[in-house]
């Protein structure tokens, strides 16, 4: 069934029993974090450069 679809093991429920999810997460952290980091940049989180931009914009609006 999922022979030629290796990436599917990352979110296949049955894969959790075989421990495939852990194996995949071990060498695919950047792919899982990529959307999270970009969304944090848009929100302006403490560890993203967008926060300073957001502060500058807010100060601009207040002035």
Image: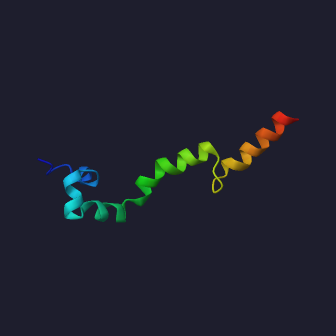
Relative depth, front residue between 20 and 5: 20
State the image coordinates of residue 27 (x, y, percent, origin top left): 36, 64
Left/right placement of residue 60 relative to residue 17 reads: right
Within the image, what quadrant is residue 25 found in?
Answer: bottom left
The extreme right residue here reads: 63
Left or right of 7 in this view: 31: right
Would residue 29 be found to the left or right of residue 48 on screen? Answer: left
Q: Position of residue 20 (x, y in %)?
A: 24, 61
Residue at the outermost left position: 1
Looking at the rendering, in which quadrant would you find the C terminus?
top right
Which quadrant of the structure image shows residue 42? top right
Whole-percent x, y for residue 55 in the image: 76, 45
Q: Is residue 52 left or right of residue 2?
A: right
| Residue drawn at the location 19% of the way across and 54% of the way down | 14
Residue at 73% across / 49% down in the picture?
A: 52
Residue at horizontal 20 percent and vertical 49 percent from the top: 5
């Amino acid at each position: 069934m999922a022979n030629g679809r290796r990436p599917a093991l990352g979110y296949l429920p049955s894969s959790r029993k075989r421990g495939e999810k852990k194996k995949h997460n071990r060498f695919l952290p950047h792919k899982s974090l990529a959307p999270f980091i970009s969304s944090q940049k848009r929100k302006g989180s403490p560890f993203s450069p967008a926060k300073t931009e957001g502060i500058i914009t807010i100060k601009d609006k207040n002035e």
